[in-house]
């Protein structure tokens, strides 16, 4: 069936009111795989989209899903992403594993009759699938958003520290051996998302990690984990430390303009290592968008909920889970208006952190 015709038959099926599928997360992997292949049946070309500024987990999961669809459903599959691949590790990840991932600007959505989203969900707002297209397949380990259940196939939530873990379960259910590149990508995806199995890790993550271990290339892994870094990376850290302010047990830094949005998250993560800190917030702008990244040490706090509450009504998107979260907001107006906007946002965060003493100490003046 030609692509356009199969798109039409898909739309017709929807118009005729196919019931939305029940939640799949509780089903065994073999049952989920069966449903997935059913949805892919008869389709010609698939496009799998990661979240914007993709991290290793999202790229690994997308590449593995494309690999699975090509081999088990006979669908030609490609991977697309919005934003940029910024961190040196992530650039090395794509390069040394020669991952077939393309910026969405190089792709034509109408050429595909099967659309997938991984490591994100339709209404989260951090991906580049235009709103006029609907995802057929959604696979994500983040908390379920109800709107995702409208997709013909939505495997969302469940007990997984990484979306890569979910894809390992599909490969195993399909008895499909990954290539060494796909195995190494998934391994690093789990490793990065769970910080070496030390954060939000479940038994499934450990099981998948051990299954992948003998299948991945440790030499390539070394090249990814210890990449060369550009001079501007050190310049950015220099500025991050210089500008970091400590409010009791919260540290906040303004990175100004960043060369890659990923750097905001990287710095927030790094500053969390300062002794006695409970909160770490970094922010910076990239192409008229203001990026926030939040880290929380207190297990009773939920970073994802907190950032959603602070950023609600600001436009843009936000997401995250227990200990880590991020947001992207549109930034407009004059220089002064932008500065005022940033100050108001930081103030709102500080209130949530319970900061009463508003006079901070520069990080570099603390012993
Ligand atoms: Mn993930």
Image (tube, grey):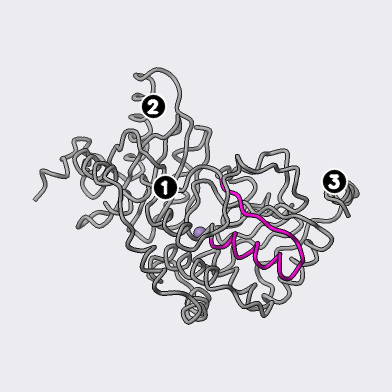
Do residues under tags 3 and 2 come within 8 Å of each other at their CB atoms?
no
Residue beneath label 1, please?
86
Callout 2: SS: helix
The residue segment tinted magenta is 60-81
- The question of residue 61 being in magenta is answered with yes
In the picture, the disc for residue 4 is 3
Q: Residue at x 65, y 48 (%)?
A: 122
Residue beneath label 2, please?
341
Point out the tag, 3 or 2, that comes first from the N-terminus: 3
Label 3 neighbour load within 10 Å: few <14, some 14-19, many 20+: some
Count how many numbered circles sit on residues in the image.
3
Instruction: Give x and y (percent) for residue 357.
Output: 21, 38
Q: CA distance from mark 3 to mark 2?
A: 46 Å
User: Would residue 171 appear left or right of 272 to someone viewing this image?
Assistant: right
Do residues under tags 2 and 1 come within 8 Å of each other at their CB atoms?
no
Point out the tag, 3 or 1, that comes first from the N-terminus: 3
Callout 3: SS: helix
Do residues under tags 3 and 1 come within 8 Å of each other at their CB atoms?
no
Label 2 neighbour load within 10 Å: few <14, some 14-19, many 20+: some
* Quarter holding residue 77: bottom right
Q: Residue at x 67, y 75 (%)?
A: 29
Point out the tag, 2 or 1, that comes first from the N-terminus: 1
User: Would residue 174 appear left or right of 237 to someone viewing this image?
Assistant: right
Considering depth in this image, is 303 or 60 the residue closer to the camera? Answer: 60
């Amino acid at each position: 069936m030609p692509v356009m015709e199969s798109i039409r038959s898909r739309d017709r099926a929807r118009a005729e009111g196919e019931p939305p599928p029940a939640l799949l997360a509780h089903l065994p992997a073999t049952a989920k795989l069966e449903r997935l292949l059913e949805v892919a049946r008869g389709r010609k070309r698939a496009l799998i989209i990661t979240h914007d500024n993709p991290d290793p987990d999202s790229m690994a999961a997308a590449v593995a899903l494309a690999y699975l669809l090509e081999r088990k459903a006979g669908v030609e599959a490609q991977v697309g992403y919005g934003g940029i691949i910024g961190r040196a590790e992530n650039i090395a990840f794509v390069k040394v594993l020669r991952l077939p991932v393309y910026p969405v600007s190089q792709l034509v959505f109408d050429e595909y009759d099967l659309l997938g989203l991984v490591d994100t969900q339709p209404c989260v707002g951090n991906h580049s699938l235009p709103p006029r297209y609907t995802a057929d397949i959604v696979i994500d380990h983040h908390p379920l958003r109800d709107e995702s259940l409208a997709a013909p196939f939505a495997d969302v939530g469940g007990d997984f520290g990484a979306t890569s873990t979910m894809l390992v379960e599909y490969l195993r259910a399909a008895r499909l051996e990954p290539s060494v590149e796909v195995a190494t990508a998934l391994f690093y995806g789990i490793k990065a998302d769970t910080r070496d199995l030390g954060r939000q890790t479940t038994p499934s993550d450990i099981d998948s990690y051990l299954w992948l271990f003998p299948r991945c290339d440790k030499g390539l892994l070394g090249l990814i984990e210890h990449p060369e870094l550009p001079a501007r990376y050190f310049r950015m850290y220099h500025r991050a430390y210089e500008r970091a302010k400590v409010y009791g047990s919260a540290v906040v830094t303004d990175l100004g303009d960043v060369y890659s949005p990923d750097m905001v998250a990287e710095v927030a993560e790094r500053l969390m290592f300062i002794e006695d800190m409970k909160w770490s917030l970094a922010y910076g702008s990239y192409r008229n968008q203001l990026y926030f990244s939040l880290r929380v040490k207190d297990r009773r706090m939920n970073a994802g909920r907190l950032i959603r509450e602070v950023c609600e009504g600001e436009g843009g998107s936000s997401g995250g889970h227990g200990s880590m979260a991020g947001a992207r907001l549109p930034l407009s107006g004059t220089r002064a208006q932008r500065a005022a906007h940033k100050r108001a946002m930081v103030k709102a965060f500080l209130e949530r952190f319970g900061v009463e003493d508003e006079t901070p100490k520069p990080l570099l003046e603390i012993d």
